[in-house]
Image (tube, rainbow, N blue to C red):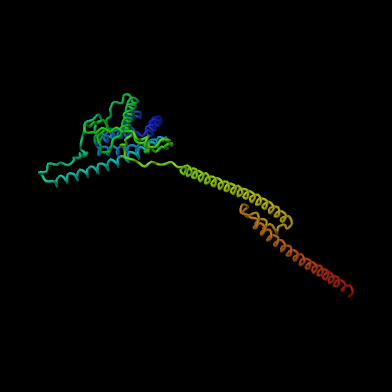
Amino acid sequence: MEESATTRHSAQLKLCINLGYLHTSAHIALYPSKTPLKKAHAWSGLAEDYYHRGKYHQAAQAYSKAARLFQQALQDIRDVETVEALRLLHIHTQERAAQMQEDTRYIKKQAMEINRQQQMTPMGSSTQGPSITTDHPTGVEHTQHATPTKDSDQPTMGNNDDPFEAFWVYLESLVDKMSNPVAFTTAPVGTTGSSSSPIPARTPASIAESFYVVPEQTEPLSDLTSGFTPTTPTTEAVPWSPSNSEAESQTTNDEVQALRQTVHKLRKEVAMLQRAANENTALRSSILTIRQEVQKKARDLKQTTGDSSRSGVRSIQALPTRTLSHDLCERRIAELEAQLKQAKVVIHQKDELLAKYKTRWEKLKESAKKKRDSKRDLPNQG
């Protein structure tokens, strides 16, 4: 429920970030009660209030607390845009806390130097140096916001009965503050001093001091400017010359040429990549063709040589088909042809030897038959 409510109001949070109002304390009423996100916004608004009152030490502490709460709120959010906005708020509050701490150290250092100078001056001296009031960490000032206690995680804020009304009121006050910026070490906005000197009225300056192109006049320039009394420091007029426009046109032409060269180079690269893709396709098709031819050759060898060529066919089929190249296939075919020739020679030799043994066997059979016949004839003759 808390995540869905935070997601619904992520658009309002992004609006505050885009406008630069990162510390809108009235906007925290839009978030669920007693959540780290609402507490973080409350501490951020209190830190902004401390900063405008010149209490930099309390502002640094409040900013640090807000940064920790923003980081804690990041663990419960799942919306990408809200997480990014909270991360920016966390970084900004950390930077503001570091800046406030640095300012506090600087003010304390200046106060110590002034006190040292006052101690070095004689007691009877009537001159007094400028006094700088430092923001002591334990100083307390009653304002419309309550001071946070040690055990409290969320400071007490004003009336939040109407959140949108409070938000727009606070937004208008921030717009007024932006239109009247406050210096770093000056008093808060709204303080008026009687010692402020009025701003002197500006008188019209000479036309020669303008940075616009002065058109040619028929009358002298001294006659045109004789009625004016310049009160501002004179500045050297910037004359217009055709060389400026020529330089700009030359720069534009150079940029156009550079862009054309870049486009031409990109076109060359695209064409090169296209050729490489075509070559890869052709190589793949040639490999597939060679594979088919090798398989066909293996089938033919298997049919012609029988069992003697099965081992060779298995070795061909066991080769990785994806890594075969043209040279490897040709080399393997040559080896298989040599093995086939050698096998044929061996078979021919065995056939000749078999025929030889067969002839001898026939001769032995005939000789044995003759011996039996001769032995059978001998008893008959006796």
- The quadrant the N terminus occupies is top left
Left/right of residue 196 with respect to residue 301 in the rendered view: left
The number of numbered discs placed on residues in the rendered structure image is: 0
Report which quarter residue 216 is drawn in: top left
- Is residue 228 among what the camera can see? yes
Q: Residue at x 64, y 51 (%)?
A: 283
| 8, 120: nearer the viewer | 120
Residue 270 at x, y percent in the picture: 58, 46
Outermost residue, right side: 381
Report which quarter residue 344 is drawn in: bottom right
Outermost residue, bottom side: 382
Residue 34 at x, y percent in the picture: 32, 31
- The quadrant the C terminus occupies is bottom right
- Is residue 75 among what the camera can see? no
| 242, 115: nearer the viewer | 242
Left/right of residue 326 with respect to residue 344 in the rendered view: left
Report which quarter residue 241 is drawn in: top left
Residue 373 at x, y percent in the picture: 86, 70
Left/right of residue 300 with respect to residue 171 in the rendered view: right
| 5, 347: nearer the viewer | 5
Residue 346 at x, y percent in the picture: 73, 65
| 312, 326: nearer the viewer | 326
